[in-house]
Amino acid sequence: MRYLRKNRALRVLHCPLLVGCNAPNLAIGERVLGIDSRAYALQVNAAFDSTFAGDAVVLSALQDSLLKREWKRWWLLWKACTWADVVHFNFGTGIFPREWGAFTKRSGWAARIFNWYAKLLGAWDLKILKHLGKKIFVTYQGDDARQGEYCRKHFAINFATEVDAEYYNEKGEAAKRRNVAVFDRYADGIYSLNPDLLHVLPARAKFLPYATVDLEDWTYVSPRPDGPIRIGHAPTHRAVKGTRHVIAAVERLQREGLDVEFVMIENVPRGQAREVYASLDILVDQVLAGWYGGLAVECMALGRPVVAYLREEDLKFILPGMAEDMAVISAAPDKLHEVLHSLVTSGRENLQLAGLRSRRYVEKYHDLKFLAGRLSQDYLAAFNSGNGDIRGVRP
């Protein structure tokens, strides 16, 4: 895909974080289409291991000094200004920092100084990029936009009622709303990886499926031919994932005498966890959020049936045909035992068929080239929306 005024490949910069490998994988898909797409991260979140970085350029390490990390922040802005045609932000985050105190429990003079610094910078990164004619896109991925108050008020099933009071606090939620408003002012496109976020994002925001896996790497793995039915669950936060409901459902199956083995996968590096996922017969993902997560995509790519709670009223936001093709088996917490019982007693052949359906679903809706194609059309539309001699991009 070429940028006509420059007569070269369109340049797309994904930044500034690595959350679930989404940004590096989008860059991979865009490069397949001929876009010069690269992912840069200020640093790797401590919650993710190196496999989430893909081929992204990580600018600083967690042990680096604050001064060095801030210098890299300014370098990333320079890179965006001088190299990119499109800057695609992820996790609802710009290059300049958010207010520190709004998202952590830190206090004292260091937090006050950093917050002063963040407020001083404000949205000048977006203003500068916009002034230079860059096209700005942003993807929200979860708690960068999700608001506990809205969830408790509007969703009968949600995890906001199960986490502690500090998980969603008034100050943090106000900061999220300010952040969304800023991006709504400057962004040419806004996306959400979770349909529930579209209740609180601007009306023009679009749903975009996860770019969690490169299907050239995450290939189908034949399930075990015998042994107990192995049910897996991999919570990053037990209250958020609804782990107590999963444990209760599996323990009930075991009390009923079903040959079931439960595998809890926690604090395991992603590379090692992948081997465990391949040994499962069924994955139970999150049962309170109303949608499936990146883990579900990984297990479906391996050919495993996945159970998660899908909120019916959110399905209006997803892609055409996606609900009809849905391979994730929906189960609210109070129906989880019933759904698992049906799967376990259906036999290995039916489980394998469900796993094959999972793989086909991922190939259709989570393929990197497919996702990059959708994004490239929006990049094209942004350049073709009345910008004088900037004629945009072409395949």
Image (cartoon, rainbow, N blue to C red):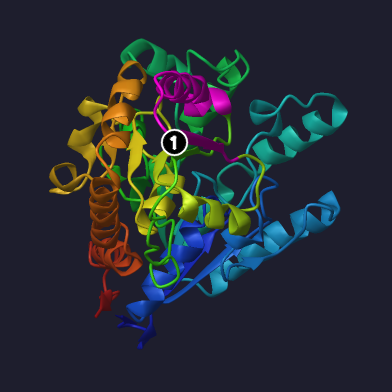
Q: Main secondary structure of the magenta part?
A: helix
Location of the C terminus by quadrant is bottom left
Residue type beneath disc 1:
Val
Region rendered in magenta: 238-265
Report the label total: 1
Asked if 27 appears above or below 130 in the picture, the reply is: below
The answer to whether any part of residue 372 appears in the image is: yes
Asked whether 203 or 226 is in front, the reply is 226
Asked if 165 appears above or below 28 in the picture, the reply is: above
x 21%, y 26%: residue: 313
For the residue carrying disc 1, how many other residues have a C-alpha within 10 Å: few (<14), some (14-19), or many (20+)?
many
x 30%, y 42%: residue: 205
Q: Position of residue 356 (x, y in %)?
A: 26, 57
Q: Position of residue 354 (x, y in %)?
A: 25, 48
Which residue appears farthest toward the bottom when viewing the image?
7
x 80%, y 24%: residue: 107
Asked if 201 appears above or below 186 in the picture, the reply is: above
The answer to whether residue 257 is magenta is yes
Which residue is label 1 attached to?
A: 180
Element marked by disc 1: helix
Asked whether 126 or 291 is in front, the reply is 291
Location of the N terminus by quadrant is bottom left
The answer to whether any part of residue 86 appears in the image is: no
